[in-house]
């Protein structure tokens, strides 16, 4: 049976690390900091502009980088990174302003840097922000030949009165799921272990779970959900949103639930993508492990006021955006329950 821990990623250690640094971060807070650690983005009041918040988030694309390197294709993961970061501030209601990137290599390859930045620029155009700068580092002895790292930070703007943090979520709210296109940017360490080590596949092999090669399937781009969220918010009260990344549905949806509330998510209420079915079967991955590691076919979940849910669903459908009613919020002990 395959586990994320066996692939080198220990989610519990990550949670412990956050707990260890929580008070260190809080010791730097001032009156302009809004909220606490644990959101998808940090928020800071704009000095001199009452009622306005800057929203900021920073991330990478994980070991999806290794797939890009194996494929020799470096012009898409930059877009994945920007869209991922864009979604992290989108769930709080922020409009993206600008993006900064960080590229590090053992020995700088100008052509590869250009390819990476071409993806970043594409992502910024999709999200609607400016790529205003960054850092390119050459670090011999730190990165092996051919390896590199890519990370970035996004900053957006939101009215404080319209900041979405889940605090208004109430029992009875409906959970609407927006579909994923694949693994997006998380869970690749376990996926690579199953596909490349256990199954012995290569990136150029025909995918056993799709119409393309293994590499093409794994490099499918992370979408930005801005258009869907704008339509949903215009049609009704969206009280909270969760970007489904590392930690899966349980680990991300719980982050927006107020104390005293739980979320019940019904498995089977949305299509499970073939890639996840294959990985679960081929790697003998337990259901609980799979839902903690991968998005399982949902890229974002919206908590919508019950009375407004039909209007939101209708607006999304009319605009051609698939959505699924995947569960509801109930009174409970602040957890996400996956039900059959």
Image (spheres, rainbow, N blue to C red):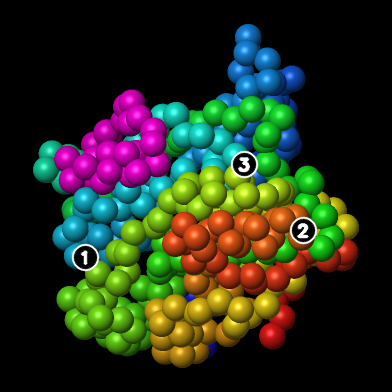
- Tell me if 96 is positioned left or right of 198 in this view: right
**Vertical position of residue 170 compared to residue 281: above or below:** above
Please tell me whether mark 3 sits on a helix, a strand or a loop: loop
Picture disc at residue 32? none
Can residue 19 be seen by looking at this rendering? Answer: no
**Vertical position of residue 245 compared to residue 158: above or below:** below
Magenta segment: 114-138
**Vertical position of residue 139 compared to residue 34: above or below:** below
Please tell me whether mark 2 sits on a helix, a strand or a loop: helix
Give the number of the mark in front: 3 or 2: 2
Picture disc at residue 307? 2
Q: Cα distance, mark 1 to mark 3? A: 35 Å
**Magenta span has 135?**
yes
Can residue 116 be seen by looking at this rendering? Answer: yes
Mark 1 or mark 2: name the one nearer the start of the chain.
1
Q: Name the residue under label 3.
A: 92
Crowding around mark 2 (Cα neighbors within 10 Å: few <14, some 14 to 19, many 20+) is few
Q: Cα distance, mark 1 to mark 2? A: 49 Å
Q: Name the residue under label 1.
A: 70
Instruction: Give the residue displayed 43% in from the left and 51% down from the top.
Output: 224
Identity of the residue furthest to the top in this view: 48
Give the number of the mark in front: 1 or 2: 2
Residue closer to the observer: 2 or 277: 277
Instruction: Give the residue displayed 19% in from the left and 81% down from the top.
Output: 205
Please tell me whether mark 1 sits on a helix, a strand or a loop: helix
Image x and y of residue 194, in percent = 39, 81
Mark 3 or mark 2: name the one nearer the start of the chain.
3
Image x and y of residue 38, in percent = 67, 46
């Amino acid at each position: 049976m395959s586990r994320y821990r066996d692939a080198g990623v220990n989610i519990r250690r990550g949670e412990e690390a956050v707990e260890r640094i929580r008070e260190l971060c809080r010791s730097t807070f001032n009156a302009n900091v809004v909220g606490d650690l644990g959101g998808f983005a940090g928020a800071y009041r704009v000095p001199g502009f009452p009622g306005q918040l800057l929203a900021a988030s920073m991330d990478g694309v994980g070991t999806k980088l290794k797939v890009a390197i194996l494929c020799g294709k470096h012009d898409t993961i930059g877009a994945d990174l920007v869209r991922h970061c864009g979604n992290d501030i989108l769930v709080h209601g922020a409009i993206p302003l600008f993006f900064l990137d960080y590229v590090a290599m053992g020995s700088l390859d100008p052509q590869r840097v250009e390819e990476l930045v071409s993806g970043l620029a594409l992502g910024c155009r999709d999200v609607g922000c400016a790529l205003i700068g960054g850092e390119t580092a050459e670090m011999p002895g730190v990165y092996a030949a051919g390896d590199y790292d890519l990370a970035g930070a996004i900053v957006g703007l939101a009215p404080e009165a319209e900041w979405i943090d889940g605090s208004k979520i109430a029992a009875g709210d409906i959970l609407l799921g927006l579909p994923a296109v694949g693994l997006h940017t998380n869970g690749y360490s376990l996926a690579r272990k199953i596909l490349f080590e256990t199954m012995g596949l290569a990136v150029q092999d025909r995918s056993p779970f799709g119409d393309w090669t293994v590499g093409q399937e794994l490099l499918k781009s992370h979408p930005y959900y801005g258009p869907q969220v704008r339509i949903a918010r215009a049609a009704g009260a969206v009280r909270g949103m969760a970007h489904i990344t590392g930690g899966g549905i349980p680990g991300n949806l719980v982050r927006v639930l107020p104390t005293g509330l739980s979320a019940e998510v019904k498995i089977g209420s949305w299509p499970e993508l073939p890639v996840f079915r294959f990985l679960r079967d081929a790697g003998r991955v337990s259901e609980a492990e799979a839902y903690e590691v991968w998005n399982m076919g949902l890229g974002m979940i919206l908590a919508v006021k019950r009375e407004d849910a039909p209007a939101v669903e209708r607006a999304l459908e009319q605009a051609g955006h698939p959505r699924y009613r995947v569960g509801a919020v109930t009174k409970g002990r602040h957890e996400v329950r996956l039900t059959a």
